[in-house]
Image: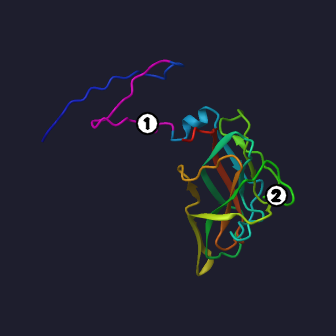
Amino acid sequence: MDTFTQTVEGLQGPLTKNQAGPISTGAFGEQLTSTVFGKYAELTRYGKVFIAKSGAAAAIPIQSTLTNSPTLWNPASSGKWVYPLMATFGVGSVGTPVLTSLTISQVLLTGDVAATNLPIATFTNIAPQPALLGRGTASTKFANAAVTFTTNPTLIADLGIMHWLEGSAASGAMLPVFFDFDGLIVMPPGTSISIGAIAATSTTYWTTIYFAELPAPYLP
């Protein structure tokens, strides 16, 4: 059996600001990373992560009529790109279980305000809270059960979260109860995303969306 010895030099403890430090690599030259604080910890530590939480449990509407759907809105003048990180769904009250799955729809060229004949007609903002507790204010807006659109948002993806009925309401289930976006959707200024369902739910859910706001990147 072949064996080898590798020596890696490093510093113990956190670095001070602007202090140079070595990068650790593996046997194949790959950079080693640590998940000791979780993959969103650095973004959170710098005050870039926010939490949008519904004010009350509400049904999730059918994707073809997304009035009063959980909606994350990055206004046109925000100067930020929004990265949805995770969406979670907690059951509020059990209604009649239906065969359904959750979806994501988009609105483009939203502008900054909601008004009649604009892409977003009405919008009751529930101000997102900073994940770095007590630090920072989000540019992004969130509505849960008080938003309407001049033209229904365009369906762009299925979340793969399903709710099915097998026999009776007691055997209905929803798996999983969260969706990790993992960088799959990015929201430039002037866009919104809404969560809908293939069939409207009568069960109500507390919806929470975690997201990051970062400066607009350079695009080639």
Q: Is residue 172 above or below residue 144?
A: below
Indicate the secondary structure of the residue bearing disc 1: loop
Q: Is residue 218 magenta?
A: no
Q: How far apart are labels 1 and 2 at the CA level? A: 46 Å
Crowding around mark 1 (Cα neighbors within 10 Å: few <14, some 14 to 19, many 20+) is few
Residue 8 coordinates in the image, percent (x, y):
31, 26
What residue would you read off at disc 2? 118
Left or right, residue 19 beside residue 138:
left
Q: Farthest front residue?
A: 220
Q: Quadrant of residue 122?
A: bottom right
Disc 1 residue type?
A: Ser
Q: Farthest left residue?
A: 1
Measuring 74% from the left and 54% from the top, which residue is drawn there? 54
**Tag of residue 34:** 1
Looking at marks 1 and 2 on the same chain, the residue that comes earlier in the sequence is marked by 1
The span picked out in magenta is 19-37
Q: Quadrant of residue 22?
A: top left
Measuring 82% from the left and 57% from the top, which residue is drawn there? 118
Q: Is residue 183 above or below residue 195?
A: above
**Residue 46 vs residue 201, the one in the foreground:** 46
Q: Quadrant of the C terminus?
A: top right
Tell us which disc is closer to us: 1 or 2.
2
Residue 48 coordinates in the image, percent (x, y):
64, 37
**Tag of residue 134:** none
Most common secondary structure along the magenta stretch: loop
Q: Is residue 23 magenta?
A: yes
Residue 29 coordinates in the image, percent (x, y):
30, 35
**Residue 87 vs residue 194, the one in the foreground:** 194
**Residue 216 vs residue 35, the one in the foreground:** 216
